[in-house]
Image (spheres, rainbow, N blue to C red):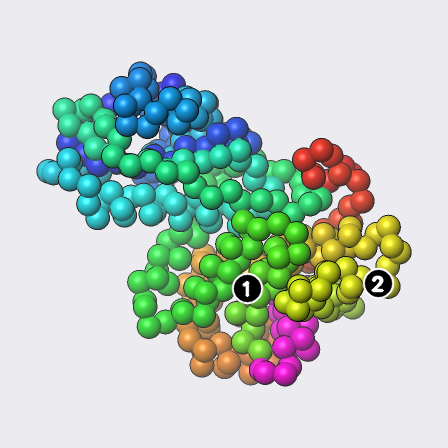
């Protein structure tokens, strides 16, 4: 447990992770936006919350190995209001955006909000956050201080888009589609990843596959191999859309490789979609090219070299290794 001196009168929110893979300092520290990062819940005696949360949930809190904590002074700490909602929603969004980096393993996560009076914290609400899954053949990656800082930058971009309700509607829907895909498994996962990229390319009716293949090579390093990856991924997406098995698009491969090929394409498109949306969330100037459908259409009317210059160095999705051996958790056994 980590002990924290709560403010005399405040409202707070806690995001707790259970059995998450981290490489972080052992002592509590603060991110640049003042969010506390702690190796445990900042209360010495969790028994004071048992009446509010029950023994099972209390045990989960006791075993948490990463906690994000925000606190704000309040003259009316007892009232459950918009401040609690804002603090909780900010941490919930941060939790989701952390998963734009692949390989994060987390058994479960809980979100709590509460109030402090005379420096004694009480819980007002607690809920379990949704599970994010990994694509079969993944390699696990730790949550680091650098990644937490970057995730706060992604959140700032997402909040800036949400503040402009008349703009960024398409990209917000695309981001929500990507996050929904990260919570799914199997071929529905790939389907959502491709759809999230379609939000960015604004394809013309009847030309979706060709434009997906061409335009996504602004995001991905162009080449023959990349083109094949994009074509096959789109075909797998279409098979899923029409309730077919996704390996119908992999019939040119040996039968014992087709499922592995489908997962390979899933990991490649997941990387591409996560990288594309991360860039847009980090870069306000780049994001302006996607603020409306008209702006997106104008972006895709630019010459290829002009678009690539604006976008920056593309991601080489062909570097993702093909995997046929997995451990008991579905990780790559390379």
Q: Is residue 273 left or right of residue 70?
A: right
For the residues marked 1 and 2, what is the alpha-carbon distance in whole angstroms? 25 Å
For the C terminus, give its image quadrant. top right
Q: Is residue 101 left or right of residue 289?
A: right
Which residue occupies 37% across, 53% down? 156
Residue 37 shows in the view? yes
- Between disc 1 and disc 2, the foreground one is 2
Tell me which residue sits at (73%, 53%) in the image: 264
Q: Position of residue 98 (x, y in %)?
A: 48, 45
Q: Earlier in the sequence, mark 1 or mark 2?
A: 1
Q: Position of residue 216 (x, y in %)?
A: 63, 69
Query: In the rendering, at what x and y percent does residue 199 appear?
Result: 52, 69
Residue 47 sits above or below residue 173 on the image = above
Q: Give the SS element for disc 2.
A: loop
Residue under the point 40% across and 57% down: 158
Part of the protein shown in magenta: 204-223
- Is residue 176 positioned above or below 68 on the image? below
Mark linked to residue 196: 1
Q: Is residue 249 left or right of residue 253?
A: left
Q: Which mark is residue 251?
A: 2
Q: Label 2 near label 1: C-beta < 8 Å?
A: no
Q: Is residue 278 left or right of residue 241?
A: left
Where the N terminus falls, by quadrant? top left
* Number of marks present in the image shown: 2
- In this rendering, is residue 20 above or below 90? above
């Amino acid at each position: 447990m980590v002990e924290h001196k709560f403010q005399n009168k405040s409202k707070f929110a806690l995001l707790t992770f259970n059995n998450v893979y981290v490489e972080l300092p052992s002592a509590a520290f603060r991110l640049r936006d003042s969010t506390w990062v702690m190796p445990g819940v900042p209360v010495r005696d969790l028994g004071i919350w048992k009446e509010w949360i029950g023994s099972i949930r209390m045990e989960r809190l006791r075993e948490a190995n990463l906690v994000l904590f925000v606190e704000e002074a309040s003259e009316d700490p007892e009232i459950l209001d918009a401040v609690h909602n804002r603090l909780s929603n900010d941490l919930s969004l941060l939790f989701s955006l952390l998963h734009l980096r692949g390989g994060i393993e987390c058994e479960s996560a809980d979100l709590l909000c509460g109030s402090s009076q005379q420096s004694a914290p009480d819980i007002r609400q607690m809920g379990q956050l949704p599970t994010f899954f990994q694509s079969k053949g993944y390699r696990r990656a730790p949550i680091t201080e650098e990644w937490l800082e970057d995730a706060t930058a992604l959140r700032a971009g997402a909040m800036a888009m949400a503040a402009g309700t008349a703009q960024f509607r398409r990209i917000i829907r695309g981001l929500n589609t990507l996050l929904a895909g990260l919570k799914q498994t199997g071929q529905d996962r790939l389907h959502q990843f491709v759809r999230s990229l379609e939000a960015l390319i604004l394809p013309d009716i009847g030309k979706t596959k060709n434009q997906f293949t061409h335009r996504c090579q602004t995001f991905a390093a162009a080449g023959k191999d990349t083109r094949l990856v994009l074509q096959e991924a789109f075909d797998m997406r279409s098979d899923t859309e029409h309730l077919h098995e996704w390996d119908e698009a992999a019939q040119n491969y040996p039968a014992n490789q087709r499922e592995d090929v489908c997962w390979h394409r899933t990991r490649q498109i997941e990387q591409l979609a996560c990288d594309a949306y991360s860039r847009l969330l980090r870069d306000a100037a780049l994001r302006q090219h996607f603020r409306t459908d008209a702006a997106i259409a104008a972006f895709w009317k630019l010459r290829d070299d002009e678009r690539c210059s604006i976008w920056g160095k593309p991601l080489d999705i062909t570097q993702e290794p093909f995997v046929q051996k997995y451990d008991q958790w579905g990780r790559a056994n390379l």
